Image: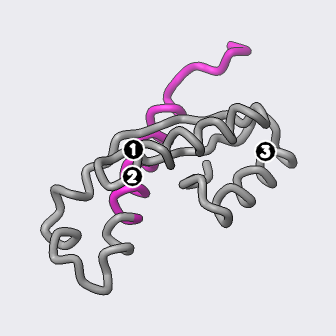
């Protein structure tokens, strides 16, 4: 799993992981009110253009008082929210039966 925002850094990392791992990787894009719709659309379009596995998850960083303080650690709290959601997603995916079973 790669946290994917559609920005240059995460797009490079996700595309590289996809090139190396193929369908064994998953790009995870956080969708929240703090993400501009155009940015979401562009990130999804890029993933689709290279046929990169993508899962869009809802995040609720705006509900976190730490994030609402809008201090220098705001980005940490945003990522912490995303990684918590990704951990839950990973557990959910791991508990699914393999297509080969």
What range is drawn magenta here? Answer: 79-101
Crowding near the residue tagged with mark 3, few <14, some 14–19, many ≥20 C-alpha atoms within 10 Å? many
**Where is the C terminus found, in terms of image quarters?**
top right
Quarter of the rendering containing residue 52: top right
Q: What colour scheme governs how the chains and residues are painted in the rendered image of this protein?
A: one colour
Mark toward the start of the polypeptide (3 vs 1) = 3
Q: Is residue 28 above or below residue 69?
A: above
**Picture mark count:** 3
- Residue at the image position 25 percent from the left and 50 percent from the top: 60
Structural distance between the alpha carbons of marks 2 and 1: 6 Å
Left or right of 101, for residue 96: left
Helix, strand or loop at mark 1: strand
Quarter of the rendering containing residue 58: top left
Left or right of 56, for residue 73: left
Helix, strand or loop at mark 2: loop
Return the residue nearer the eye: 61 or 25: 61
User: Quick check: marks 2 and 1 in contact, CB under 8 Å?
Assistant: yes
Tag 3 residue: 18
Q: Give the numbered dot on residue 31.
A: 1
The location of residue 85, given as percent across then percent down, is 38, 48
- Residue at the image position 75 percent from the left and 34 percent from the top: 49
What main secondary structure does the magenta stretch of the protein show? helix
Tag 2 residue: 35
Front disc: 2 or 1: 2
Q: Is residue 68 above or below residue 45?
A: below
């Amino acid at each position: 799993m790669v946290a994917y925002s559609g920005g240059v850094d995460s797009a490079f990392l996700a595309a590289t992981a996809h090139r190396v791992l193929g369908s064994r990787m998953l790009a995870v894009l956080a969708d929240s009110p703090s993400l501009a719709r155009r940015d979401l659309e562009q990130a999804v379009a890029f993933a689709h253009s290279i046929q990169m596995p993508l899962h869009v998850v809802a995040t609720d960083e705006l509900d976190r008082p730490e994030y609402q303080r809008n201090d220098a650690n705001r980005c940490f709290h945003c990522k912490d929210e995303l990684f918590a959601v990704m951990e839950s997603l990973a557990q959910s995916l791991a508990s699914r039966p393999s297509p080969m079973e």
